[in-house]
Amino acid sequence: MQKMGETPGRGRNGRVGGAVLTPHAARKFAAFAGIGAAEFDQLRAIAQFESAVAAGTDIMRAGQPFGPILLVNEGWAVRYRTRSDGRRQIANFILPGDFMCLDATVMGHSDYDISAVTAVRHVSFRVEDMIGLMERQPILCAAIFWCTAREEAMLLEHLVSLGRRSAYERVAHLLVELWRRLKSLGLADEDGFAMPLTQELIGDCVGLTSIHVNRMMRAMQADGLISCAHRPSHHCRILDVSRLEAAAGFEEGYLHLDGMPGRVRAAFRRSGRTDKL
Amino acid sequence: MQKMGETPGRGRNGRVGGAVLTPHAARKFAAFAGIGAAEFDQLRAIAQFESAVAAGTDIMRAGQPFGPILLVNEGWAVRYRTRSDGRRQIANFILPGDFMCLDATVMGHSDYDISAVTAVRHVSFRVEDMIGLMERQPILCAAIFWCTAREEAMLLEHLVSLGRRSAYERVAHLLVELWRRLKSLGLADEDGFAMPLTQELIGDCVGLTSIHVNRMMRAMQADGLISCAHRPSHHCRILDVSRLEAAAGFEEGYLHLDGMPGRVRAAFRRSGRTDKL
DNA sequence: CGAATAGTTGAAATGGGTCAACCGGTGTGG
DNA sequence: CCACACCGGTTGACCCATTTCAACTATTCG
């Protein structure tokens, strides 16, 4: 969590207005909200430019007024809160295709920090543009509402972990969740994924000491559930998915992989005006 | 958490279409989103009827398809998740003026349970009506979005409690939060509030045993921070607000008492069509 | 080469859980 | 009207999961 500031970098594809979006968000919208390419293009049209920030950079700071809404093209970020004594609690990890600062649409300032875990590339949307689009295209409004509802569902499951799961279960649950999310993005293999998190980040996420996270992960290795390699590129391999999920008490319902129900989609489309851009 | 079912009761004021809404929601909307009486009346117009349920009744069950969106007129409810082994984690307490099942606008089924802590009166909104209204009146859409964003902010603070606060701090924090919320509704005195929660509910909220909640509350009494009376009507008196808040590590920012920023309000109103009901 | 970062391991301390008993009020049925 | 059961709160003794403190290793970076 270091110096603020981003390389406004409009990288290799950084034209203003209609910046390049990585396909993750489009796939997510298509799968869950039935958003077609034509509709998604309207979102793409108001994208401002792409920025690239280095690992460790602060992207948003608690108490500060919101800037633009951001959509991650590549890389991992963390959203967290810091207590006055310096102890930290991570709310969630932000992966490609996830929005950051969506609540800028209705709130003046942030009550959380976000910083880049790995190098991150993201595009910006002006709040006013986003509001305008949501009004013109109710189905996109629904899709964005869906994103926040799903995020809240994941936050609730996280709460269950902290309140009612053992240390072993918490770590296992986090690993399964990350793997599932990455797999749905096409960013994980069948048996594991590239793991950029330190044990300290994991601890700050699941409410444990990094030391105890270490012990739990070594226990899981001893139990034949996972195997982790740090060098050269941190990788986490899941040796037995079903046993790991059982150990975590994992139930996938909260990920809402079933998408938006038809009747809702219909209600939102009824007055959609696809013509009027 | 007992039998499902509500008395469709359209109580003493239960006409269909424009049921009576208690002023809590209107005040909340006015204070935070700048929603005027005329705009709020459009919400009132699509309210279906009022229902009354007894304490302990299940209002929503995890895995079930959503019914209508509900707005609490009176009473307390809990939203929680139950693990397969029966352990329970409470997400939040629902007070007068709060919506329930707002995510029915974009999700098919619930991943949480809600049940009535006290007797509860609430009004229903058909999902389709709510979607229609949000499209016609962007500023009401914003207000509802604001409700969910604020709920998420409170959930995040709750996560901080479970992950990074001691038992004593957690209980203190919950008490302060409840008192503040009730006070902003005009439902608490300067020095305390009527407390319908059992120590078991408090424990399920803050991730502790009811036994340990008891110890913490007695310690807080011994420390001169609070004083609780069970009979006849459970009441919690706060003896020293600032010391209690200090003990809790309470920072009010996450309650977002400052409301929606003007520029957002302006953006949402720009295309508002107040005429077209 | 030396410093900083991440992981690993052990021993001791502790916060909160578990088990068990008891109390007081309230409601119910005989 | 009383006896009894039940629920919620209260307290104590003991136990164990996780933290804390401390040391050591391997690796990367300047």
Image (cartoon, coloured by chain):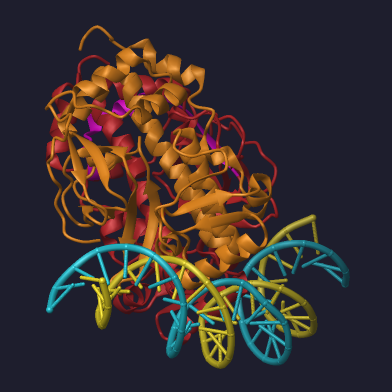
Chain colours: A red, B orange, C cyan, D yellow
Q: Could you say where residue A54 lies in the image, as x and y percent from the top left?
A: 61, 46
Q: Which residues are magenta?
A: A32-53
Where is the N terminus of chain B found, in terms of image quarters? bottom left
In the picture, residue B71 is in which quadrant? top left
- In this picture, residue D16 sits left or right of residue A191: right
Q: Is residue A116 above or below residue A182?
A: above
Q: Could you say where residue B228 lies in the image, as x and y percent from the top left?
A: 53, 57
In the picture, residue A140 is in which quadrant? top left
Q: Nearer the viewer, residue D26 or B44?
A: B44
Query: Is residue A121 shown in magenta?
Result: no
Tell me if I can see residue B34 in this picture. yes
Q: Is residue B60 above or below residue D7?
A: above
Where is the C terminus of chain B found, in terms of image quarters? top left
Query: Is residue A44 shown in magenta?
Result: yes
Q: Could you say where residue A248 lies in the image, as x and y percent from the top left?
A: 37, 73
Name the residue at 39% across, 49% down.
Answer: B93
Q: Nearer the viewer, residue B32 or A196?
A: B32
Q: Nearer the viewer, residue C1 or B144?
A: B144
Q: How many marks?
A: 0
Q: Is residue A277 above or below residue B114?
A: above
Name the residue at 49% across, 17% down.
Answer: B263
Q: Is residue B88 above or below residue A240?
A: above
Tell me if I can see residue B167 in this picture. no
- In this picture, residue A31 sits left or right of residue A179: left
Q: Could you say where residue C21 lies in the image, as x and y percent from the top left?
A: 45, 89
